Amino acid sequence: MLAFESGFTPIELGAAQFNAYLADEGLDAALEARRRGGSAAAPGRERYRRAAKVWLWGDAADRAKATMSLPLEIVPVGVPGAREALRARVLWKGRPLAGALVKVWRAPLGADAATRDSIGVAWRGRTDSRGEVAVPVALAGEWLLSVVHMEPCTERSEDDWESTWSSLTFQRAAAVPQ
């Protein structure tokens, strides 16, 4: 397992685009706060960071299940790609994050970059009260799980919102040994 955490990058989106992004990422609390606070018609000022993980390969479940101390992290409960469903836990600052929207993409094995970049979401689901979700990954391919968490920015003079984007990528072979 490899992990990467970026620093924050500021971005500003027009009101309609920002609200659509919040809805698409399942960031209901942030969208409701904008509506309640009267800022839904204002541009969205946000700083975001990434927390990415990739499972290279192997069958060591203890390595796959180890946390990497990322601020937002998708932690497999088993070896990614070993079974037809991957149970994963989403952690925010080391604690289970309930109700988070997990989005999943799948590219065919060996897909070129253009194909890989144009694939739509294959599955969506929300984490349960323990921050867990079971993702169907029965087909062979390159898989990407993604989750976003957003909170009001602590430095309001710079940005209104602070988000963390977490991902887990892995490959499921055409024939998985049992």
Image (tube, rainbow, N blue to C red):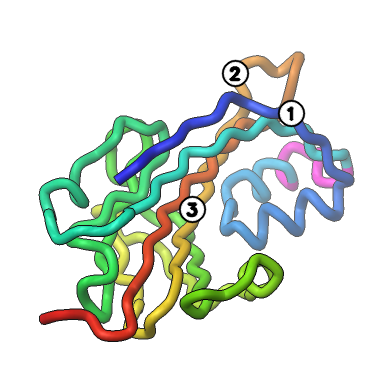
Q: Position of residue 133 (x, y in %)?
A: 31, 65
Q: Residue at x 28, y 70 (%)?
A: 81
Q: Earlier in the sequence, mark 2 or mark 1?
A: 1
Disc 1 to disc 3, C-alpha distance = 19 Å
Disc 3 to disc 2, C-alpha distance = 21 Å
Instruction: Residue 147: give its label.
Output: 3
Q: Are marks 2 and 1 in contact (CB under 8 Å)?
A: no
Q: Residue at x 47, y 63 (%)?
A: 144
Answer above or below: position of 11 versus 82: above
Q: Specify start and end residues of the magenta stretch as a single range.
A: 35-41
- Which quarter of the rendering shows the C terminus? bottom left
Q: Residue at x 37, y 43 (%)?
A: 73
Tag nearer the camera, 3 or 2: 3
Q: Position of residue 79 (x, y in %)?
A: 20, 62
Label 3 crowd (10 A; few <14 / some 14-19 / many >=20):
many
Q: Is residue 129 visible?
A: no
Does residue 37 belong to the magenta stretch? yes
Disc 2 to disc 1, C-alpha distance = 14 Å
Task: Answer with left or right where residue 89 lies relative to residue 36.
Answer: left
Identified by mark 3, the residue type is Val
Label 1 crowd (10 A; few <14 / some 14-19 / many >=20):
few
Does residue 56 belong to the magenta stretch? no
Identified by mark 1, the residue type is Pro
Answer above or below: position of 108 versus 8: below
Task: Answer with left or right where residue 41 lies relative to residue 55.
Answer: right
Q: Earlier in the sequence, mark 3 or mark 2?
A: 3
Considering the numbered disc 3 on the image, is that residue within a helix, a strand or a loop?
strand
Q: Which residue is mark 1?
A: 10
Q: Main secondary structure of the magenta part?
A: loop
Considering the numbered disc 2 on the image, is that residue within a helix, a strand or a loop?
loop
Instruction: Residue 154: give its label.
Output: 2
